[in-house]
Amino acid sequence: MAIWVDFFKEKLEGSKVVVDAEGKPYVSKEIAPKEYVEVELNITQQFLPYHIYFRRFDVNGVELENRLFAQVGDRDLALKSFNDLTAKRLNSFELVLDGE
C-alpha cells in the first residue's frame, strides 16, 4: 500500500483507504449518510498531486455529486483542504437542518 495513504489515515479519524476499479488507492471519510470527502494522489505533470473531492450518493449507490474541491501541492495543504471541506459541508448541513 502506498505510504501517502498512511499519512492521511492517521490524521483523519474515521477515514478508510479505498481502492478503485483500476487498483488506485485513495482515502475516504463519510461525513454524513452517503456523503464523502476524499483525497486522491494524481501524479501527472499537468496537475498538482493531491486532489480533494466531495462525493454524494443516493440510497441505491448511484453517484449524485462528484465535485473537485481543491488541488494542492503537498500533504499538509491537502489535509487542511480536506478538513476545510468537511467543516464547510457539516456547517451547511446544520444550517439546513435548523431551517435557515
Image (spheres, grey):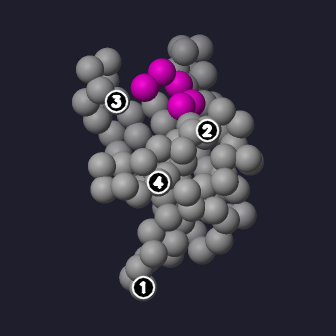
How many angstroms separate mark 1 from mark 3 (CA)?
31 Å
* Label drawn at residue 45: 1
List x then y, in percent, for residue 35.
46, 31
Residue at 28 percent across and 35 percent down: it is 63
Residue at 60 percent across and 22 percent down: it is 94
Q: Which residue is mark 3?
A: 57
Residue at 49 percent across and 58 percent down: it is 40
Q: What amino acid type is highlighted by mark number 1? A: Gln
Q: Earlier in the sequence, mark 4 or mark 3?
A: 4
How many angstroms separate mark 4 from mark 3 (CA)?
20 Å
* Label drawn at residue 63: none
Judged from the image, the secondary structure of the residue bearing numbered disc 3 is strand
Q: Which residue is mark 4?
A: 25
List x then y, in percent, for residue 37.
52, 42
Q: Which residue is mark 2?
A: 15
Q: What amino acid type is highlighted by mark number 3? A: Phe
Q: Earlier in the sequence, mark 2 or mark 3?
A: 2
State yes or no: discs 1 and 4 in contact (Cβ < 8 Å). Answer: no
Answer above or below: position of 30 versus 17.
above
The magenta span reads 30-34
State yes or no: discs 2 and 1 in contact (Cβ < 8 Å). Answer: no
The residue at the far front in this view is: 1
How many angstroms separate mark 2 from mark 1 (CA)?
28 Å
Badge 1 local density, few (<14 within 10 Å), some, or many (20+)?
Answer: few
